Image (cartoon, rainbow, N blue to C red):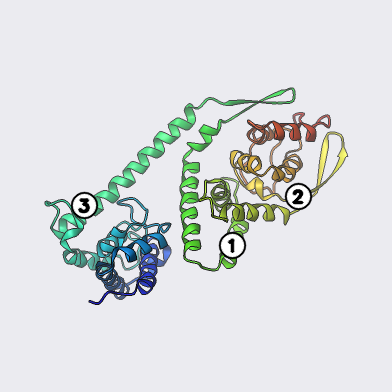
Amino acid sequence: MAAPNVDEVSIHVTKFLGILKSSQTQEFHGWNSVAMRRAWDWAKFISEAVEHLDDAAKSHLNNTFRFDGVPSLSFSAEFTMSVLEQAPHEFVRAVVCSPYLVTHPLRSEIVQCVVSYYPQLPQHVSSDANSTTSSTRLFADITTRLNLTRSTSVLMRIANMLTQSQPPLSVRLGSRELLVPSHAAWRSHPETLHMLALALSFQRQVLAQAAHDRSSASYLAQVAAYFNDSAASRDSWSMGKSVVAQAALLDWPDKSPWKQRLLDVVQVAVADTPTRFTFTSIAHISMIDAMSRLLELSPWLAGDLCRSVPSLAMEYVPCLLAYSGANNCPPAADVTWPHVTLDERLGCLVAASPNLTAFCESCLARPGLLEPC
């Protein structure tokens, strides 16, 4: 086989990584034996193509796809050349590890394909001399998946225990002491851990998108739509808004403009839903038109955002007062996010932030705002 053009190989690699990612989504339910065969042939082509690349070409591929994730649960999700060199094994392993395999409408057909492909895997995919048979490799991949699932369950139980063992945080606001769940307790909560994992995955997706020089404007519009359309419920915070907001707070490569772009998405979304109030009495706030998307985030995540972009607090705090009025009031019937007290919202906002503390104290200066219902 002649040495392939690295640009052509890059196109093929993009297609192969798309196949792997598709196996981990609802799209997988549209696969049949024909689609499996095409994907298998593509994986074999990729592994053969990279064998003939020189070091410079391999370095180019590593740089181009360094932010692309590999949706296989059996090893690190970071892209390396071994993913391409062992493309056939990565493909069958991705299918075995797919969360959509058990519910696939053609599950038996898909499994038969996978079982038939394992004997065709090259010998070099395993460094263990005792793991050379196809049945051993298949069993090892299934075992890995089960062990990881079991480990995840155990870690989530540990996280729950850590959350419950964290003492509350005492926050001073004016003459009042607010007791709120600690930031560490929030970070170790299973729902938060799930959100953080999704935010990290989303960050890698954004960086991969930028590395491939795709249209940033259209992609940014998709991100904004994802943020705006995702909604909270009475039982859970908005996962879409949380993922985008948390991703904006992560550390990004120095030259990447995407941290600011994601923060802009949040700021524009809040600005698009203006908050206006009138005071009908000293102790009561009447809301004319208030809809803050920050209220669909957990108190600590909203607080972290406001500490990163203090101008957001100018929308957030008045909206809190409009919806809460007085401390511990029950939520209005049309409120579609989990209820937390005004104390908790404010405490998570002003923690370790003298500037936000002063701002909140000025907002709360009117007598009666914090009197019980």
Q: Name which quarter of the figure residue 278 lies in.
A: top right
Q: Answer with mark 3 or mark 2, whichever residue precedes in sequence.
A: 3
| Disc on res. 290 | 2
Crowd rating for badge 2 (residues with CA inside 10 Å; few <14, some 14–19, many 20+): some
Q: Position of residue 206 (x, y in %)?
A: 50, 58
Q: Which residue is mark 3?
A: 140
Q: Answer with mark 2 or mark 1, whichever residue precedes in sequence.
A: 1
Q: Specify the amino acid type for callout 3.
A: Ala
Q: Name which quarter of the figure residue 50 lies in.
A: bottom left
Residue 13 in view, yes or no:
yes
Under circle 3, the secondary element is: helix
* Mark whose residue sits in front, 3 or 1: 1
Query: With 132 as the anchor, is 299 left or right in this view?
Result: right
Q: Position of residue 338 (x, y in %)?
A: 61, 43
Q: Position of residue 132 (x, y in %)?
A: 13, 57
- Residue placed most toward the observer, 143 or 53: 53
Q: Residue furthest right?
A: 281
Residue at 55 percent of width and 47 percent of height: 246
- Residue placed most toward the observer, 250 or 60: 60
Crowd rating for badge 3 (residues with CA inside 10 Å; few <14, some 14–19, many 20+): some
2 and 1 marks in contact (CB < 8 Å)? no
C-alpha span from label 3 to label 2: 55 Å
Quarter of the picture holding the C terminus: top right
C-alpha span from label 2 to label 1: 26 Å
Q: Specify the amino acid type for callout 2.
A: Ala
Q: Specify the amino acid type for callout 1.
A: Leu
C-alpha span from label 3 to label 1: 40 Å
Q: Residue furthest front?
A: 56
* Mark whose residue sits in front, 2 or 1: 1
Q: Which residue is mark 1?
A: 220
- Residue placed most toward the observer, 122 or 164: 122
